[in-house]
Image (tube, grey):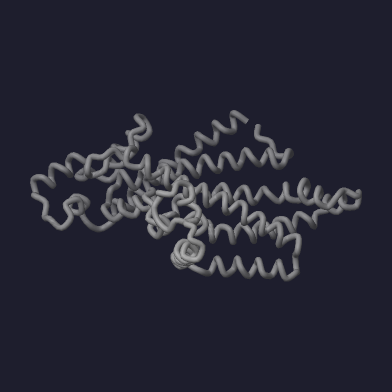
Amino acid sequence: MGRYVIRRLIQAIPVLLGATLLIFCIVFALPGDPIAALFGDKRPDPAVAEVLREQYHLNDPLLLQYWHYISGVLFRGDFGVNFADVPVSEMLAGKFQVTLNLALTALIIEALLGVGLGLWAALRRGRATDTAILASTLLLISVPTLVTGFVLQLVLGVQLKQWTGLDIFPVAGTFAGLRSYLLPGFVLAGVSVAYLTRLTRTSLVETLRADYIRTAIAKGLPRRRVIGRHGLRNALIPLVTYLGADLGNLMGGAVITETIFNLQGIGNQLFTSVYLREQPVVVGIVTILVLIYILANLIVDLLYAVLDPRIRYE
């Protein structure tokens, strides 16, 4: 197991280098001058602009710029500074916590609703409940996140407060603590809930048709034990894979949700930094997301051996 983990971590190095180099090239190719964007509507003094370009290595070739950045990340843990001389790690510290809270809230909502509804639909396959759940998930997939966010913000955040007098779902900011993440968490998890519900239903239906399930039922085991211990446990493998990969998607795809609910996370910062062409900030955010993807996939692979004892890592 230890050798497997070390091997996977070594394999993650070229993935990290490839992803950061690709995003560095994309940001470099964007039109516009980052130094001019730093001054806003004012025209920068040519001498000052040249000094700033030299300071941030903007006159160097692309690969040399990338080497300056990635060598600091790998050897010193330094993500550099933005064009206002603010350390990227310091800038992202609080914003990362906001996005992580949002993503974890969405992941918990996704796991509870997705697996629960999928299990319910699978056990009532072909009935009205199954049809209603499948239709609801199709509707959830079809509606854009932007529309879902504003509708729930209006109904649950504004109208529900007017009807009941209770501020259960804050509509913006993080002033209400963990309650601030409930509504945006559901919006962010909406499409994933629909996909996970369908995946759970399909996986469990296929598992319940297996021969060992028929054998367990024929031996007289209780239906709840057959479904919970034998059926659901084996059906969880594709679900764990999906949830592990989706954690990175939730963190990286929070731009729209954070904008709607005025959450100052890395999604919001990513949008701003791409607009200003701040390569260190953009690549720093991407580096963090890639590391989260790698760690999540490693945890998922290790969970396989827990769910299915036949899987072993030598």
- Residue at image location 30% in from the left, 51% down from the top: 273
Image quadrant in which the N terminus is located: top right
In this rendering, is residue 200 above or below 63?
below
- Please provide percent x and percent y for residue 247: 52, 48
Q: Is residue 107 visible?
A: yes
User: Would residue 118 appear left or right of 171 to someone viewing this image?
Assistant: right
* In-front residue for pair 271/4: 271
Q: Position of residue 196 (x, y in %)?
A: 61, 57
> Which residue is rendered at x = 63% and y = 70% of the image?
135
Picture quarter with the C terminus: top right
Residue 280, horizontal then vertical, whole percent: 30, 43
**Front-most of residues 47 and 224:** 224
Left or right of 56: which side holds 262? right
**For residue 168, above or below residue 293:** below
Q: Residue at x 36, y 50 (%)?
A: 264
Seen as rendered, the residue at the extreme right is 219
Q: Is residue 180 left or right of residue 2?
A: left
Is residue 145 visible in the rendered image? The answer is: no
Q: Residue at x 71, y 62 (%)?
A: 121
Say if 288 sits above or below 170 in the image. above
Counting every numbered tag in the picture gives 0
Residue at the front extreme, as displayed: 165
User: Residue 167: horizontal and vertical position, in percent?
Assistant: 47, 57
Image-quadrant location for residue 21 = top left
